[in-house]
Image (spheres, rainbow, N blue to C red):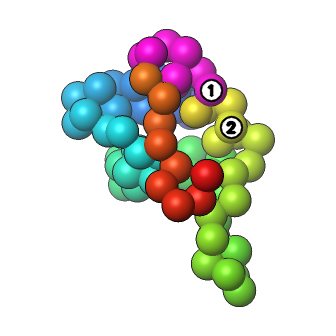
């Protein structure tokens, strides 16, 4: 699955479900995407348990915000 296909899925899920936070959208995507596509996403730090965005996630969030016109919130992480 290409990054553009994942973006289209994110836009579809985000707008349908009224998602406002990045982690909510990420959880939905991880449940709905096929296993090979999930490798694009970061995992939590083993010690701190904090989320650290990778380059793909930054790209996905920026493009989602640009195309949907809403800025996803990051909760306490940023």
Task: Pick the residue in front: 30 or 71.
Answer: 71
On screen, residue 8 above or below 53: above
State which quarter of the image contains the N terminus.
Answer: top right
Q: What residue is shown at x 69% (from left), y 51% (from top)?
A: 53
Q: Which residue is mark 1?
A: 62
Task: Pick the residue in front: 7 or 76.
Answer: 76
As for residue 66 lying within the magenta part, the answer is yes
Q: Quadrant of residue 17?
A: top left
Which residue is most to the bottom?
47
Q: Quadrant of residue 2?
A: top right
Q: Are marks 2 and 1 in contact (CB under 8 Å)?
A: yes
Question: How many badges with numbers are in the image?
Answer: 2
Q: Which residue is mark 2?
A: 58
Residue 77 location in percent, x, y?
59, 59
Residue 55 location in percent, x, y?
76, 41
Tell me the CA gap for discs 2 and 1.
6 Å
Region in magenta? 62-69
Q: What residue is shown at x 61% (from left), y 52% (from top)?
A: 78
Mark 2 neighbour class, 10 Å CA radius: few under 14, some 14 to 19, many 20 or more:
few
Dot 2: element: helix
On screen, residue 23 above or below 4: below
In the displayed structure, does residue 76 sit left or right of residue 19? right
On screen, residue 7 above or below 29: above
Dot 1: element: helix
Q: What residue is shown at x 36% (from left), y 39% (from top)?
A: 20
On screen, residue 76 above or below 25: below
Which residue is most to the right?
55
As for residue 65 lying within the magenta part, the answer is yes
């Amino acid at each position: 699955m290409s990054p553009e296909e994942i973006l289209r899925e994110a836009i579809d899920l985000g707008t349908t479900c009224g998602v406002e936070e990045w982690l909510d959208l990420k959880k939905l995507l991880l449940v709905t995407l096929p296993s090979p596509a999930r490798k694009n996403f970061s995992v939590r730090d083993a010690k701190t348990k904090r989320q650290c965005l990778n380059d793909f996630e930054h790209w996905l969030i920026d493009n989602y915000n640009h195309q949907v016109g809403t800025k996803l919130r990051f909760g306490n992480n940023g």
